[in-house]
Amino acid sequence: PQRDPGRRGFLINAGALCLSAALAGCAAPKPAPRRAPQSAKPGSVASPVVSSAAAPVPALKPGARIAIVAPASAALDAADEAAEWLSARGYVPQVMPAARSRLDAPYDYLAGSDADRLADLHAAFAAPDIGAVWCLQGGFGSWRLLDQLDFDLLRRHPKPFIGYSDITALHLAMQRRA
């Protein structure tokens, strides 16, 4: 049977496009070191910026394990559909627990508690057998993790981090701090 290419189809295709783009260029030459800001206003609080160049993210190889996480929200059955999609392309999906959960109202837009979603994200980056971390979709909840991210952990375990929409807040934080 033909599927309706509605919102879910769009989200799956957008995620696939992000994954394809990440897989095509995830190994790059080491960038030039970032320069720390020249000066800050007295009394201002500047967030730490990594002054040395980040380690290049290793290329993802066929058969690699990809963690499926939901740092924000998750649609019903989206994790299993993403796992099927990855499997069909020769990757080994690992669906993290919060990617299959939803909170009760009024927080039913979140894929699990902040602690559970953060634990999944950290576990995916820390696992040596995970080659990439793929976010199911964006959503309002990703900003809730920003002040709790372990940037030292992310820096020690560089991996392609794939996502869009509100996941951009995590991308920007990782770029700046990890």
Image (cartoon, rainbow, N blue to C red):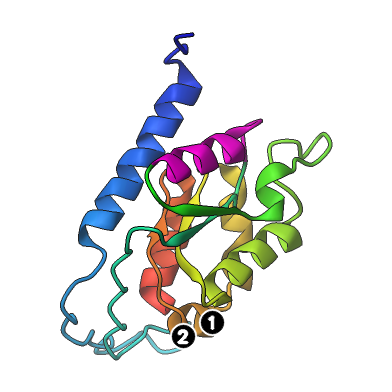
- In percent of width and height, residue 7 lies at 47, 21
> Residue 88 at x, y = what percent?
42, 40
Q: In this view, does 78 lie above or below 62?
A: above
Q: Quadrant of residue 75?
A: top right
Residue at 18%, 80% in the rendered image: 31
User: Which quadrant holds the C terminus?
Assistant: bottom left
Q: Spot the residue most to the top.
A: 1
Horizontal side, residue 102 vs residue 158: left or right: right
Amino acid at pointer 2: Arg
Can the viewer see residue 158 in this picture?
yes
Q: 46 and 138: which one is in front?
A: 138
- Mark 2 — residue? 156
What residue do we see at 36% from left, 85% from top?
A: 50
- Magenta span: predominant SS is helix
Tell me whether the residue at label 2 lies in contact with that at label 1, contact meaning CB atoms closer than 8 angstroms: yes
**Residue 168: x percent and y percent?**
41, 53
Q: Is residue 118 above or below residue 167?
A: below
Write down the quadrant of residue 73 in the picture. Answer: top right
Mark 1 = which residue? 153
Left/right placement of residue 138 relative to residue 162 reads right
User: How many numbered circles are shown?
Assistant: 2
Q: How far apart are marks 2 and 1 (CA)?
A: 5 Å
Label 2 residue SS: helix
| x then y, percent, for residue 65 | 48, 61
Q: Residues within 10 Å of mark 2 (few under 14, many from 20)?
A: few
Image position of 95 (left or right of 67): right
What is the span of residues highlighted in magenta in the rendered image? Answer: 74-88
Q: How dense is the environment of label 1, judged by Cα within 10 Å: few (below 14), some, or many (20 and up)?
A: some
The stretch drawn in magenta includes residue 86: yes
Give amino acid for label 1: Leu
